[in-house]
Image (tube, helix red, strand yellow):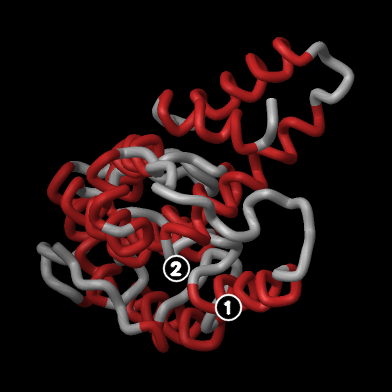
Amino acid sequence: MLPLMPRTTRTTLAAAAPGERSRRLARARARDEDADDVSDSAPPPPQLRRAVRLVDYRERSSGELLKRLREGGGRPPCPPASESAARRVVARLEAAGLVDDARFAELFVARRWRGRSESPGAIRRALFAAGVPAEVGDAALAAFFGDDDARGGSLRPPAGPVRGSGGDGGEDDEEEEEEGQEDAIDGGAGGGSSPASRWRALVAAAREQARRGEALAPDKRRARLARWLAARGHSWDTVAALVREVGL
């Protein structure tokens, strides 16, 4: 399993550390220009050029990159690579720091949680489909959600009330706002920092979905919200707790 990069050197899907990423890409391209002078075991130049273009566009897992290289295509067209040639290309980009499954998985987990409110189990399946090795995906899930929720596949309802999840306002509003700011710094958008903050984020997402069905009858609003949560992989215990939490 590849180790997670130190916090200070991690990139983000948006464009963290663009200078370092550009320098790495420049070094890879420079090596590619000299490809004709290397041994037969070196990656074929067309496949290497295509791989650099692919990772220049966005982060890729090693599995996805292997699949794209074996399929060929792209612009300009690139012939399909053999299994061994594709693996040599990926190994070269891994050595340059352009492909890192641990980094990809870490960013993938955060994006799917913050953008789609998916359960750990649903994100695990998406990681596998994206070509991330199972042990690397499991490590990223455990780092973000904690071991218990990652193993269980769904966020567990808290044993007691969670301050701030009720949304009714009150004397704790200012303190709750400060806690939310800390969550954004530590884990971003209410995820990845603590079970309470993740639950608050999920409650907020459920409330937003409930508001979108305000014109419906109460039973249809409940069913609509339950379907939305179940489609994101949340267990029925979690779904029932969230439906109660939002007052439906």
Q: Nearer the viewer, residue 164 or 16?
A: 164
Q: Identity of the amino acid at label 1?
A: Glu
Residue identified by numbered label 1: 182
Q: Farthest residue toward the right?
A: 215
176 with respect to 237 (left or right): right
Give the vertical position of 84 relative to 152 (above or below).
below
Q: Secondary structure at mark 2?
A: loop
Q: How crowded is the residue under tag 2: few (<14 C-alpha within 10 Å), some, or many (20+)?
A: many
Residue identified by numbered label 2: 193
Say if residue 79 shows up in the picture.
no
165 with respect to 137 (left or right): right
Give the vertical position of 123 relative to 243 (above or below).
below
In x, y percent, where is residue 242?
Answer: 56, 35
Residue depicted at x 41% and y 28% = 237
Residue depicted at x 34% and y 44% = 127
Say if residue 140 shows up in the picture.
yes
In x, y percent, where is residue 44?
Answer: 26, 58
In x, y percent, where is residue 84?
Answer: 13, 49
In x, y percent, where is residue 215?
Answer: 89, 19
- Quarter in which the C terminus is drawn: top right
Give the vertical position of 25 relative to 149 (above or below).
below
Q: CA distance from mark 2 to mark 1?
A: 9 Å
